[in-house]
Image (cartoon, rainbow, N blue to C red):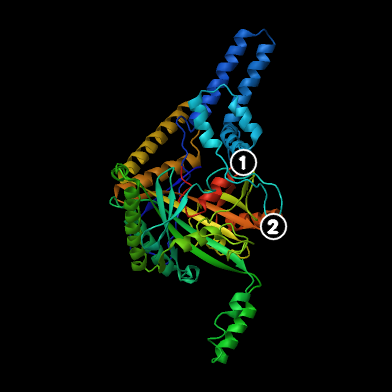
Amino acid sequence: MGLYDLIVKGPTTLSEPSQRFMFGPTQGRGILAGWKLSQLLVVFGSALLALVLLNNFMPPANFFGCITVLSCGILSATVTINSRKPIDWIPVVFRWLLSKYSDRKEVRHFFDKLPVPSFLKSLIRHRYFPTSNFQDGHFPSGEPVMISGKRDLFGCKLLSGPFGAGVLYQPKSSIYICVIRLRGQSFALLSPSERDLKVQSYATLLSSIARSSSNLFRIQWIDRSYPEDGQDLANISMNDSIDHPQALNSYAELIKQMPQKITSHETVLALSIKETRSIRNTKSPKSRQEMCFSLLLDEATLVVKALERQGFPTDGILNFSAVSNLLARSYAQSPKGSIGWELSESFPWPMKTSSEWDHLRTDATFHSTYWISRWPLIPVGSDFLAPLVLGQGVRKTLSVVLEPIPLGHAVREVERAHTASLADERLRSKAGYLISAKSKRETSDVIQRENELAEGHLSYRFSGFVTVTAESKEQLEQEKGVIKHLGAKAFLELRELYGEQEQGFNATLPLCRGLS
């Protein structure tokens, strides 16, 4: 998946009532004239195969074979199908087929008979053919399903840290995550100048997180919306307002004027750290875990204080039970967690999953995830995401994962990109091609990033995802159309993650995933 670079600036003097923001193009510059290594290899391989056919077969078979091979190679490297080249679809389709059919006995039996070295076979078996702990292969409704063979859908454990804090641990990558719940502040109702001040405060917070002394690996902002019928609002504060009939009548009148469907929101911030080399060299695994817990909670406490200082109220670090409920609500049929059976807090994962080409099923709910492949290329205000975030009547999750880039590494990357951009322009000029407006925009964006880094501003790479959730396939198809419309109103280009729905769904959970 392509990534974006974000330059985080500190507070500045507001020179106009409302600031405008622009996003650079997606990273993805090739190694030669904009071509990736895979494209060059496919074209070179097809040309080599065409040469072999031309020399070893008699005409006219060699001529037609040569033309066919060359055409297939060039088309697979240049034609775009749903924003991807055919050679880019091959690994996606391969991984999806393996994930869907790797639990079947016929596939395992065929794989065991392949003439593959034992060490390579064990490596592939561990990665693609995990053993399943479930014996029953049915949903509660009785519909057959492929059971997820992993330890759980998310590949992580929920642990209880110091002071009862809930910590998500990913053993494979040695990452520890804690979650902070944020309180809403009606950002869309603020004046333009007040919104700009909030954005500057948030930029100051990001700058402090990206400091060289910080141990945070990634941060993730998640906003979930749950449709409601408004009946709960009608019952709020009824007992408290019984002595104030005027206030009660005013509240009832306001409820009547509201639309039939309303949306409640839940916003959290996930923070992650990675085991450092010094911690990894500790002999005792328990000591390593305790050191990581302490390090993570220290960083989370600093972030909570920084949020409060910048005017963003929080509910603090979530405890074990709150994190468990947060995970359960991501796939529960009801946002309140009533999914038809008792859910254990120690196992907040779906019992059964089925990963299809265009959606993921977890227990009794269906999910479809989109990657934000293009952010606004035109100047937008600080509330440009309001149509997507505040869209009514759709159960959705918006996630943005950010990873701070060390200043030295960011400078080397932008210098390398600048050199490649100049080399591509010279190569195109020598070949007689005009430099497109897109190439000029990319070059100017690289120069701007280089200047901002030289001024001392910090850099992030980030990626965004949107997951829509429904209780049936038919409802999911309807709400997917609504999500696309809301994304277009926010000047976003949403790309459905065909064949990668499980990975996309994980990217909208508080696991700080989604960056390669």
Q: Which residue is mark 1?
A: 82
Residue lying furthest front in this view? 135
Number of residues whose C-alpha sits closer than 10 Å to that of mark 1, classed few (under 14), some (14–19) or many (20 or more): few
Give the residue type that dot 2 points to.
Gln
State whether residue 393 appears in this view.
Answer: yes
Q: Nearer the viewer, residue 329 or 196?
A: 329
Marker disc for residue 495: none
In the depicted structure, whether residue 363 falls above or below residue 253: above
Residue 292 coordinates in the image, percent (x, y): 34, 51
Residue 179 coordinates in the image, percent (x, y): 43, 59
In the depicted structure, whether residue 464 falls above or below residue 29: below
Residue 384 coordinates in the image, percent (x, y): 51, 60
Give the residue type that dot 1 points to.
Asn
State left or right for residue 278 relative to residue 504: left
C-alpha distance separating marks 2 and 1: 23 Å
Number of residues whose C-alpha sits closer than 10 Å to that of mark 2, classed few (under 14), some (14–19) or many (20 or more): few
Q: Which residue is mark 2?
A: 475
- Asked whether the residues under the numbered discs 2 and 1 touch, taking CB atoms below 8 Å apart as contact, a structural biologist would say no
Name the element at disc 2: helix
In which quadrant of the rendered view does residue 130 lie? top right
